[in-house]
Amino acid sequence: MEFLRPTTWQEALAAKAETPEAVPLQGGTDVMVEINFDARRPVALLDLGPVACLRDWEVAADGRLRVGAGVPYARIITELGDRLPGLAQASRTVGSPQIRNRGSVGGNLGAASPAGDSHPPLLAGDAVVEVESAAGGVRMIPANEFYLGVKRSALRPGELIRAFWMSPAAGPQYFSKVGTRNAMVIAVCSFAVALHPAERRAGTGLGSAAPTPRRAHAAEEFLAAELDWDGAPPLGDALLTRFGELAAEAASPIDDVRGTAAYRRHAVAVMARRTLGWAWNDYREGVAACA
Ligand SMILES: Cc1cc2nc3c(=O)[nH]c(=O)nc-3n(C[C@H](O)[C@H](O)[C@H](O)COP(=O)(O)OP(=O)(O)OC[C@H]3O[C@@H](n4cnc5c(N)ncnc54)[C@H](O)[C@@H]3O)c2cc1C
């Protein structure tokens, strides 16, 4: 197996162009497991570890955060938890401290598993994925268009993920995950909500409840029509229940070893209700504090 070790982003793009079959390696928490279990035997590995810029994040000129593909979950929690609270909550549920020290959102996107924990908050927070190839240049792909099928993404041959872009939270964000235990567990299903008060709308993201992570569009439209952002009254049971139902209708889950489709639908409805309730309560407290 060839081991390619570029030290700059341009070298990485050139190496990927020259050896298209090379498998990118960031934290290795997916790739090395597959290799160790003989599930994958790539002819070449493209180690992105030495490409320092992938581990940087910055505030871009437009105020959005541009977070390098290789920034590990541990740093998202400690350095960006205040600005990306939904993603930080999801990051806290990933694996163990060792996995959170190595694993990255870039690797989660590269794997494009429907169960990846970063996807729901990326969807709810309107993230955009920056990808680049030597031949095709830079493309900006909204998270909503990134996931194409089970472990299939919109990445084209030769493209590498450079970063993801996301606005700092302008309102409360929550993530919830159901697993068979509290740590080191793949999601049975998950849900994220992000309130965008200035736009009078809420974003959503479902995980492990369909062939791809996806938004619950009808649930979002329902909230845009129903929420009273100015008066910010407590949410009634009927609204929460309907939101949960619409979120569950967006799912198209399967029966598998982790859970049945029926259980997943039920759990998505429960998580949607709860996360919206938590987020709205935070929002109401903010409104009351400013009144
Ligand atoms: C014990 C254990 C527990 C885990 N628990 C969880 C969990 O709770 N939740 C969860 O979501 N995941 C979990 N995972 C899976 C894994 O940790 C995550 O998917 C993580 O985000 C992968 O990041 P990485 O940097 O290690 O990726 P890598 O393993 O390096 O790469 C993953 C995939 O992305 C591709 N890739 C990497 N970087 C790029 C790039 N810049 N451009 C294009 N493609 C790229 C690789 O080729 C590969 O296909 C777990 C894994 C283990 C071993």
Image: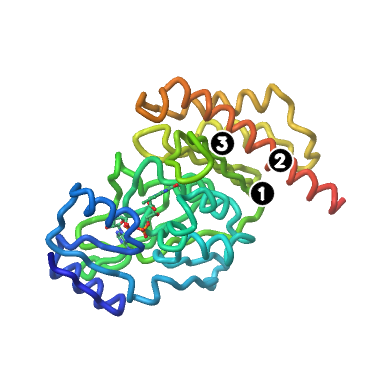
Three-letter code, disc 2: Trp
Mark 1 falls on what kind of element? loop
Name the quarter where the N terminus is drawn: bottom left
Q: Nearer the viewer, residue 233 or 103?
A: 103
Q: Residue 54: give x, y in percent of width and height.
A: 39, 71
Three-letter code, disc 3: Glu
Q: Residue 3: give x, y in percent of width and height.
A: 18, 70
Q: Nearer the viewer, residue 241 or 93?
A: 93
Give me the disc on residue 280: 2
Task: Answer yes or no: disc 2 within 8 Å of ligand 1.
Answer: no
Mark 3 falls on what kind of element? helix
Give how far apart the Cα atoms at labels 1 and 3 are.
15 Å
Q: Residue placed at 36% from the left, 28% from the top? A: 257
| Residue 188 picture quarter | top left
Would residue 232 be found to the left or right of residue 160 on screen?
Answer: right
Q: Residue 34: give x, y in percent of width and height.
A: 25, 50
Q: Nearer the viewer, residue 290 or 97?
A: 97
Above or below 108: residue 242: above
Q: Residue placed at 58% from the left, 33% from the top? A: 271
Return the residue at label 1.
172
Q: Residue placed at 58% from the left, 57% from the top? A: 84
Give how far apart the Cα atoms at labels 2 and 3 are.
14 Å
Give me the disc on residue 220: 3
| Residue 239 picture quarter | top right
Q: Would you say the residues marked 2 and 1 are in contact, meaning their CB atoms lie under 8 Å apart?
A: yes
Dot 1 or dot 3: first in sequence order is 1
Three-letter code, disc 1: Pro
Above or below 34: residue 179: above
Quick one: label 2, few (<14), some, or many (20+) residues within 10 Å? many
Q: Nearer the viewer, residue 154 or 151?
A: 151
